[in-house]
Image (spheres, rainbow, N blue to C red):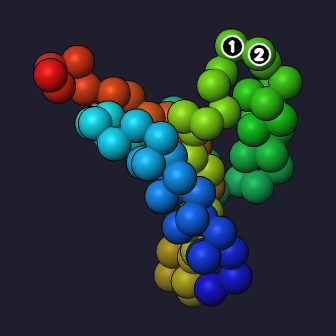
Amino acid sequence: MPGQRKRKREAAGRAAADPGRAGRWEVVFETQDEADWRAYVRRVRAGREADLSMLRLDTLCGRSVQPTTYRLSRFVPCDDHP
């Protein structure tokens, strides 16, 4: 799949930056309309309060039965990690 190697390398870089970081990905926005998706991502990138390194953009490829879904998630670190 195109771009998969780059995504793995970026994820590995984020993990290497703080190996003790534990947490989970929380879905912020999810839609099946590509125009809504692009508009929302544009607004997030324009806003300076969001840390873009803590965001993940996913495109879940659709099939004939299930349409394509677009998702924006943010990383939420665990507070109980020592």
The quarter of the rendered structure image containing the C terminus is top left
> Is 55 displayed left or right of 76 in the figure?
right
Q: Amino acid at mark 2?
A: Arg
**Point 74% across, 28% down: residue:** 44
Tell me where residue 58 appears, x and y as whole percent: 58, 57
Q: Tag count in the figure?
A: 2
For label 2, the residue is 48
Whether residues under marks 2 and 1 lie with C-beta atoms below 8 angstroms apart, the answer is yes
Can residue 7 be seen here? The reply is yes
SS class of the residue under badge 2? loop
SS class of the residue under badge 1? loop
**Point 59% across, 57% down: residue:** 10
Mark 2 crowd level (few <14, some 14–19, many ≥20, 10 Å Cα): few
For label 1, the residue is 49
Identify which residue, 62 or 1, lies in the foreground. Answer: 1
Mark 1 crowd level (few <14, some 14–19, many ≥20, 10 Å Cα): few
Q: Which mark is residue 29?
A: none
Tell me where residue 6 appears, x and y as whole percent: 65, 69
**Point 78% across, 18% down: residue:** 47
When the figure is inspected, residue 31 is found, relative to residue 75, above or below; the finding is below
Can residue 29 be seen here? The reply is no
Quarter location, residue 4: bottom right
When the figure is inspected, residue 37 is found, relative to residue 70, above or below; the finding is above
Tell me where residue 29 appears, x and y as whole percent: 56, 37
Identify which residue, 42 or 24, lies in the foreground. Answer: 24
The quarter of the rendered structure image containing the N terminus is bottom right
Q: CA distance from mark 2 to mark 1?
A: 4 Å
Quarter location, residue 55: top right
**Point 50% across, 81% down: residue:** 65
Tell me where residue 43 appears, x and y as whole percent: 80, 27
Identify which residue, 28 or 46, lies in the foreground. Answer: 46
Q: Amino acid at mark 1?
A: Glu
